Amino acid sequence: MLKVVVSFLFLVTLFYSKAQVAMDTIETKGGRMILYSNRTWQYVEDQKFNGILNPRLHELVSKDSSLRFVQRWDNNVCFSTDKSNDMNKLKDTLWLCVVDESDDEFVMPVPGMLTSRYGPRKGRNHNGVDLDLNTGDTVRACWSGKVRYSKFNNGGFGNLVVIRHHNGLESFYAHLSKLMVAPNQSVKAGEVIGLGGNTGRSFGSHLHFEIRFYDAALNPEEVIDFSERKCRDHNLLVHRYLFKPGAKPTNLDEEEIEEPEVELKPIESQHKYYRVRSGDTLTEIANKNRTTVSKICQLNGIRVTTSLQLGRSLRVK
Ligand SMILES: [Zn+2]
């Protein structure tokens, strides 16, 4: 009898320490939130969220018996290294709508110059591109989506945000000095997700930016033209050669690409940037730099009515 009571008490304790017992719900800006007894919380809509933001694509790559790709919704692992998503299995080309299936257009994560490209670097692969910034500069979501990961990463990324997008891709923003979003939070394109920095394996402030398709990194320049500050095309053709570390963007001239020797050497020196000071207006900035307000708006993806944050770097040429 005593044995039964002890095991019952043990089970009860186990239940209350492990289980999330809902205590209350509150209305928040992000939707209705459930508060649990173990001091954690969750949005009501996330209770049934399976991580799939592009059902059409997911149906295609998970149901195909030769692919069987998986896309977990894991808030603690930035990318999975298991062999399920082997891009060599892709025998056909997938047609991905980069912009059309998102709520919004593409927005540059930071206005700074491209300082290092994707590709082989010191015997490893540089899985993304580096963009210039100063510590404290705002970093923005490049498309709308849902934050899957937002925490310090010991693998070298430092403070890292990963966003899953409606187009089937994920974007990575590394070395941040401050995280300003939480896992499972929905974000719009252009929304501030953190501040740039130099955390993790980084030498000098910059944004390490990656684009991944089902955990596999691809060259961000395949998708984004960083000098034009927009997507190369509304569509992205996904095939196995896209994921080869040595692969070069299909739309670039051979001469344009050189392996970076010095990580922070600006590539696009013909561009000119201006850092916003106290009291600046768009008209003044345009006059100072002998350009027009509409040209600045176009280069930076902003509107005439956008309020200018102090210290923000604007491209003027
Ligand atoms: Zn990098």
Image (cartoon, rainbow, N blue to C red):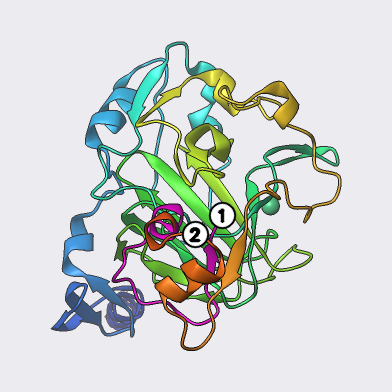
Residue nearer the viewer, 91 or 249: 249
The image shows a total of numbered marks equal to 2
Question: Which amino acid does the dot numbered 2 rest on?
Answer: Thr
**303 is within the stretch colored magenta:** yes
Q: Quadrant of residue 38?
A: bottom left
Q: Position of residue 80 (x, y in %)?
A: 53, 44
Q: Quadrant where the C terminus lies?
A: bottom right
Q: Position of residue 313 (x, y in %)?
A: 55, 69
Question: Does residue 82 appear anywhere in the picture?
Answer: no
Q: What residue type is disc 1 on?
A: Lys
- Residue 130 sits inside the magenta stretch: no
Q: In the depicted view, which residue is nearer to us: 3 or 192?
A: 192
- Can residue 43 be seen? yes
Circle 2 or circle 1, nearest the eye: 2
Q: Residues within 10 Å of mark 2 (few under 14, many from 20)?
A: some
As displayed, is residue 259 above or below residue 286?
above
* Nearest the eye: 41 or 295: 295
- Compared with 295, 83 (above or below) is above
Decide: is 113 above or below 85.
below
Identify the residue position indicated by label 1 in the image.
Answer: 317
Can you identify the residue that label 2 sits on? 291
| Residue at far top of view | 91
Labels 2 and 1: the sequence-earlier one: 2
User: Magenta region: which residues?
Assistant: 296-317
Name the disc covering residue 215, or none.
none
x, y (%) of residue 87? 53, 24
By secondary structure, the bulk of the magenta-drawn segment is best described as loop
| Direction from residue 8 to residue 275 in the image, left or right | right
